[in-house]
Image (spheres, helix red, strand yellow):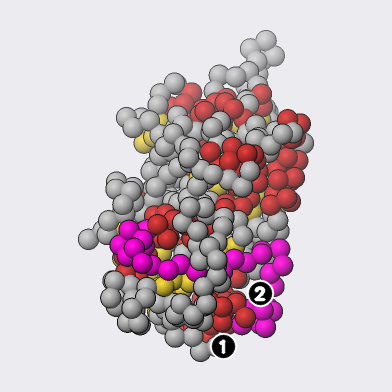
């Protein structure tokens, strides 16, 4: 048996690590995400066991604490100490900070592994024409080396759908019929927040050249969701007749000179995290706000209706559909419900797919290696573009699908992953497109009013 290499039954599998760097404990945490990532890795490992592979994966879960510096340093630790082959992270702020390690002027901190982000909606991220605050920030956003990937839509698509809803109200968006179309927007002081305002302004300007956009920027390190006095001040700024920060159409990070007395807003919008949007919603309720509040995807977090109850009624937003209406999405939803007792929450499918495609890329990149632990981050990065071959064998969520995927990869056959959130077909810049849903609070829960297909048509037409 020694001469023949043994039966293999006593061999311990090689375990490869994937870093999962997401907020876990703050008021802004999406509490269901770790479970979705763990489900993906558990099913990949089950599939590998069924296929007789001596390879397994483990997730290294770390808490960002909503601090990009913490996210960067812990990512560096996961790669250098634990040999993580990729980093999965949550927000644009963290995605940019981690990716920036490959573009700053310090070669000693280069991660050289792909960064897969589940809710990086910043429009300028992974754009060849992006402009940052300095040369390093610009290089990071442009990401010429293709280190950054995302499994969600950009904010551009969300706001395109919201635009249709808002402009349909009143006189081309002028809901209060005072002759002025004005939107007040609440965002965080990061690439996602500033980019969201600029892209929204551009979208509304295309249908109403006289639109006025006010940007209220929050300094995230100092935020306390329970500080009612602070949030009441912010609520009044959002709804008053002044414009403290008119968005500069030429530069996402700047404002034009303040304008006093330009009229109250016709709509309120936000692109902030859970906890923050709950705090501002409560403040708007306290000041008896009458202006309609529209939201991005984060308002649909599972804790929002738990904390606000019927206060969510009538509020609307646009975010990713909870899962793809396909055999892949339905399988994911059923398996998640069986594993956790809950159906998918917002972006659970995106998290599941991020873990799944990362594992598949590592399998693809390490195939044929004497020691899979030697696979490099650059090889994994390149393999992420090779797991969605159009005429390849379709791979769906579940152990059976991942078992077949391993066998196809081992045989040198192409695969085509069809995910829980959608096809997860990365474009040359690492972007994907998924379906969106217009949701509304009704009787204390969120329901879908309409879905939009951004996959086949990036203009996101309504699905009949």
Residue that mark 2 sits on: 225
The dot on residue 92 is none
Mark nearer the N terminus (1 vs 2): 2
- Check the picture and name the quadrant holding the N terminus: top right
x, y percent for residue 21: 65, 49
x, y percent for residue 436: 37, 58
Q: Which residues are magenta?
A: 203-232
From the viewer's side, name the closer residue of 436 and 181.
Answer: 181
x, y percent for residue 44: 53, 40
CB atoms of marks 1 and 2 within 8 Å: no
Residue 261 higher or lower than 156, as above or below:
below
Disc 1 crowd rating (10 Å Cα; few below 14, some 14-19, many 20+) is: few
- Check the picture and name the quadrant holding the C terminus: bottom left
Q: How many angstroms separate mark 1 from mark 2 (CA)? A: 14 Å
Query: In this view of the protein, can residue 442 be seen by the observer?
Result: yes
Q: Is residue 379 magenta?
A: no
Query: In this view of the protein, can residue 349 be seen by the observer?
Result: no
Q: Is residue 433 left or right of residue 245?
A: left
Q: Is residue 215 magenta?
A: yes
Kindly identify the residue that appears in the image at 51 percent across and 29 percent down: 383
**SS label for mark 2:** loop
Kindly identify the residue that appears in the image at 49 percent across and 85 percent down: 289
**Number of numbered discs on residues:** 2
Residue 3 higher or lower than 187, as above or below:
above
Q: Is residue 390 left or right of residue 441?
A: left
x, y percent for residue 15: 66, 34
Residue 349 higher or lower than 261, as above or below:
above
Residue that mark 1 sits on: 286
From the viewer's side, name the closer residue of 75 and 20.
Answer: 75
Kindly identify the residue that appears in the image at 61 percent across and 52 percent down: 93
Kindly identify the residue that appears in the image at 52 percent across and 53 percent down: 251
Residue 230 higher or lower than 193, as above or below:
below
């Amino acid at each position: 048996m020694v001469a023949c290499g043994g039966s293999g039954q006593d061999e311990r599998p090689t375990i490869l690590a994937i870093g999962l760097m997401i907020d876990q404990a703050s008021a802004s945490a999406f509490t269901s995400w770790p479970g979705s990532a763990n489900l993906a890795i558990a099913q990949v490992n089950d599939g590998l066991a069924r296929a007789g592979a001596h390879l397994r994966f483990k997730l290294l879960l770390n808490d960002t604490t909503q601090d990009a510096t913490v996210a960067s340093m812990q990512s560096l630790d996961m790669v250098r100490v634990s040999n993580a082959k990729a980093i999965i992270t949550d927000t644009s702020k963290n995605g940019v900070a981690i990716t920036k390690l490959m573009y700053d002027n310090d070669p000693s901190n280069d991660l050289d592994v792909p960064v897969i982000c589940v809710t990086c909606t910043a429009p300028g991220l992974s754009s060849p024409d992006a402009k940052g605050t300095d040369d390093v920030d610009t290089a990071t956003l442009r990401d010429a080396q293709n280190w950054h990937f995302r499994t969600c839509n950009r904010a551009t698509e969300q706001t395109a759908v919201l635009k249709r809803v808002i402009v349909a109200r009143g006189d081309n968006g002028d809901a209060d019929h005072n002759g002025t179309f004005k939107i007040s927007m609440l965002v965080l002081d990061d690439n996602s927040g500033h980019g969201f305002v600029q892209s929204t302004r551009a979208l509304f300007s295309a249908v109403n050249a006289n639109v006025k956009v006010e940007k209220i920027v929050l300094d995230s390190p100092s935020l306390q969701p329970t500080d009612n006095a602070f949030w009441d001040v912010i609520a009044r700024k959002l709804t008053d007749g002044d414009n403290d920060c008119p968005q500069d159409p030429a530069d996402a990070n700047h404002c034009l000179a303040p304008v006093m007395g330009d009229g109250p807003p016709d709509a309120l919008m936000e692109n902030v995290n859970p906890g923050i949007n709950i705090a501002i919603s409560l403040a708007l309720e306290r000041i008896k706000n009458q202006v309609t509040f529209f939201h991005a995807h984060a308002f649909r977090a599972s804790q929002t209706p738990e904390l606000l109850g019927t206060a969510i009624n009538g509020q609307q937003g646009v975010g990713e559909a909870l899962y793809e209406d396909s055999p892949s999405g339905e399988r994911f939803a059923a398996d998640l419900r069986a594993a956790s007792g809950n159906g998918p929450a917002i972006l659970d499918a995106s998290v599941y797919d991020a873990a799944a495609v990362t594992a598949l890329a590592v399998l693809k990149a390490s195939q044929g290696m004497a020691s899979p632990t030697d696979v490099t981050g650059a090889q994994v990065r390149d393999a992420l573009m090779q797991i969605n071959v159009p005429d390849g064998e379709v791979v769906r969520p579940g152990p059976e699908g991942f078992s077949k995927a391993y066998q196809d990869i081992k045989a040198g056959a192409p695969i085509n992953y069809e995910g829980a959130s959608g096809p997860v077909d990365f474009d040359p810049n690492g972007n994907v497109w998924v379906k969106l849903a217009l949701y509304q609070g009704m009787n204390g829960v969120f329901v879908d009013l309409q879905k939009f297909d951004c996959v086949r048509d990036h203009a996101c037409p309504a699905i009949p």
